[in-house]
Image (cartoon, rainbow, N blue to C red):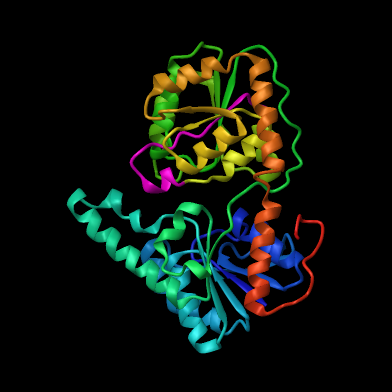
Amino acid sequence: MILLLSAAHPHDDIRVVRKEGAALAAAGWPVCHLAPGPEDAPTALAGVSIETYRRPPGWRGRLRYLPRLAARAASSGATVLHASEPDAWAAALLAARRSGARVVLDVHEHYPSRLDSRLAAPLRPVARAALRLLCRLAGRAADAVVVAKDGLAGDFAAPARTLAVRNYALPAAVTPRCHRPGPLTLVHAGAMTRSRGWPQMLDALALLPEGTRLRLIGRFTDGSEAEFRARAARFGDRVECLGWLPQPEALARLAECDIALILFQPGEENHRLALPHKLFDAMQAGLPVIAPAFATEVAGIVSAAACGELVETADPGAIADAIRRLENPTRRALLGEAGRRAAATDYAWAGEAARLVALYRRLLKDSRPLPKGLGFG
């Protein structure tokens, strides 16, 4: 059995369960995701069995639960422990010493810079060096390291055992937007925070014609929702907050809009290296994207796919100008179709799934042929 081990990711996480877990299950291995979550969570998703646990909240709660998480992983009978956060890495490495399981570290973020926003500038280089050392030690101790973006590999001293499995697009049953003349509806999907650009989003909206609307799909994750709603009140019903929606419904509501906004703000390394699901959701929905020029991974895809506009996202005027350049429905349709083609070919998940399965074949010395139907081989 393969145990997907999470200390923070939800039981139904898109990357962990619906992409990686589903690919491994389709290849014939039994897969279970052990994650924090409610007792009434479904027992299986996408071919992956689900087991949830309750732990105290916050970072302290995660650290206090770590020994129990390691014990549960050790007693699971898993052949491979696939861990998705640094504390889950630690739990997996501790568990493997008892059980003999293989360990795969799944790296989603640039962890050496995670403390930058909490520390004074003179302390950041020291903190980055210490965290990078811990990443390197964990990489040496693990059997393999999987990174969600190319730019994360350099923090792990295990190049021969490090593999990029990028967060590319899952096939999605969504009817693409049919772009027509008329007032525009802008949309932001996914987690919303100040550092993901809601102040700039509202300031840009204020510079646009009164018929322009803004739709948010997802949760606020930094405690700033009350401040957002207070500032958005001046726009009346031009701003619509739908909250979190199940993935199929979120995609359908996304495809009702005209332009997708990805407005990560500069100053965070994780924003420079971001490769968010929302980019591929927008491409599959046939929406042109407005994205940050400084974000290496996102900007490279938007440029290569010719599916949107790259701007200085700290400047509301630049955002508003890009939206004006997309007022023509024919141009939006051309960019949206280019994005759909790219998401189905160059940036499709099937190729990444094949890389992950091939890694597990090597780890488990499994010589069965790769399965068909997911773009393998």
Residue, far left? 122
Q: Position of residue 348 (x, y in %)?
A: 68, 47
Question: Residue at image x 52%, y 19%?
Answer: 323
Dominant secondary structure of the residues highlighted in magenta in the image: loop
- Give the magenta part as a residue range: 255-273
Residues 56 and 116: in front is: 116
Left/right placement of residue 280 relative to residue 85 reads right
Q: Position of residue 193 (x, y in %)?
A: 42, 40
Question: Residue at image x 72%, y 42%?
Answer: 344
Residue 188 image-quadrant placement:
top right
Q: Is residue 267 magenta?
A: yes
Residue 155 image-quadrant placement:
bottom left
**Can the viewer see residue 255?**
no
Q: Position of residue 259 (x, y in %)?
A: 59, 26
**Can the viewer see residue 59?**
yes
Q: Position of residue 176 (x, y in %)?
A: 73, 31
Question: Residue at image x 47%, y 78%?
Answer: 93
